[in-house]
Image (cartoon, rainbow, N blue to C red):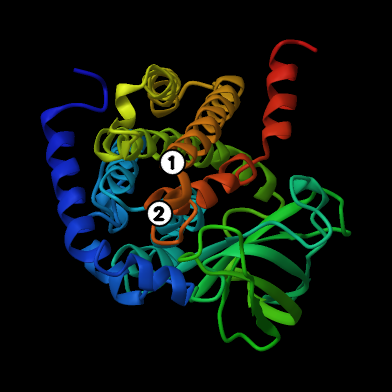
Amino acid sequence: MTIVDTPERRQLRELTRSFVTREVLPHLSDWERAGELPRSLHESAAKIGLLGIGFPESVGGSGGDLLDSMVVTEEIIRSGGSSGLIAALFTHGIALPHIVAAQDEALIEQYVRPALAGTMIGALAITEPDGGSDVAGIRTCAVRDGDHYVVNGAKTYITSGVRADFVTTAVCTDFPGSGSLSLLVIDKGTPGFTVGRRLEKLGWHCSDTAELSFADVRVPVSNRVGPEDTGFLAIMQQFANERISLATQAYATAQRCVDLAVRWSRDRQAFGRPLVARQVVRHRLAEMHSRTEAARAYVHEVAERVAAGQPVVTEVAIAKNVAVSACDFVVDAALQLHGGFGYMRDAEVERHYRDARLLGIGGGATEIMNEIIAKGMGL
């Protein structure tokens, strides 16, 4: 029995599988075409406790830790969901942790509890049009004016930015690019805060993504998360969980594609016998399975150390890259085995092929992870 295979977590898997079968699978194709999830899905997930997994009960969550969140992620994808669905439904997983960590009761009551109850949607805004991975170079600025900050700037590629009721926003509280960052929670509808066009993407079609702009937006100082100029540290401290989540999505997507490819290869007849009867197909499936299992084992090991509070920055970067690499190989091989059908929008493997491409970009690109790994090697 592994760390993510306990009686309680098996029950969590069953709950998640039932939710996906009942609430997601009949509608996912429509949501993909609509470009977003319905708000009612957040409420449905909250009612059965899924939305609050990984957040303490003291702030309105369901309890559990990173490993429990991984179980939910694994099972959603294994049951036929997608990483795009997870990005949209669980955006609060990146929007709320900074607020919870700051232990600001007013902000917890105003934003955390409603988001975990599914009645509000939150987003996290860090990336800017002229910079992605360079968090310290953020140029969106907040200038103190009495009891308010006046915010000017722009953000892009913001997950759930179209639907979000509030956005936890990284701002510079000194001069642009100074690295002196703070986090402000900014409400949709605040004068000067504009949600721009919905961005069309290669994958994650059911996850809405937006550009945001801020023109003299007045945000109460009380909406600052933690002390001023602590935003950079707060962001860095949450990266480990986000990267483990993306690594989990990667190996879970790989596993789902292995399952789909095995099923297809057994059922599909070619030249009078099933595909799986051919050695080249069996060996390809064996390699897909091997890479997936190796990635899962390493991510689980690192995740257990993260959950225990160990500083494993390098190992987290390795875990993300290993899982993404396995996923890239497997989704490509799975689509190839499906032949012409795999290229069709009606094929589930086609969606995973598109969705997987973002996993090596989000939460720190593969190249950034390699730089972290190199530093960990003393290079």
- Between discs 1 and 2, the one toward the N terminus: 2
Residue type indicated by callout 2: Ile
Q: Quadrant of residue 133?
A: top right
Instruction: Give 63 or 43, whichever is nearer the viewer.
Output: 43
Please state the horizontal and vertical placement of residue 60, each as a whole percent of the image: 28, 59
Q: Quadrant of residue 281?
A: top left
- Determine which residue is flagged by label 1: 249
Q: SS for tag 2?
A: helix
Instruction: Give 67 or 25, whichever is nearer the viewer.
Output: 25
Give the residue displayed 49% in from the left and 39% down from the top: 336
* Other-residue count near label 1 (Cα within 10 Å), few / some / many at <14 / 14–19 / ≥20: many
Residue 40 at least partly seen = yes
Q: Label 2 near label 1: C-beta < 8 Å?
A: yes
Q: Is residue 301 left or right of residue 180?
A: left
Instruction: Give 207 or 221, whichever is nearer the viewer.
Output: 207
Give the residue displayed 69% in from the left and 45% down from the top: 232
Please state the horizontal and vertical placement of residue 371, each as a whole percent of the image: 75, 26
Instruction: Give 339 or 328, whichever is nearer the viewer.
Output: 339
Q: In which quadrant of the rendered image does the N terminus lie? A: top left
Residue 110 at least partly seen = no
Residue farthest along the top direction in this orientation: 378
- Determine which residue is flagged by label 2: 86
Q: SS for tag 1?
A: helix
Q: Quadrant of residue 372?
A: top right
Residue 238, numbered circle: none
Please state the horizontal and vertical placement of residue 212, each as a whole percent of the image: 68, 73
Please state the horizontal and vertical placement of residue 163, each as a whole percent of the image: 49, 76
* Other-residue count near label 2 (Cα within 10 Å), few / some / many at <14 / 14–19 / ≥20: many
Q: Is residue 290 above or below residue 128?
A: above
Residue type indicated by callout 1: Gln
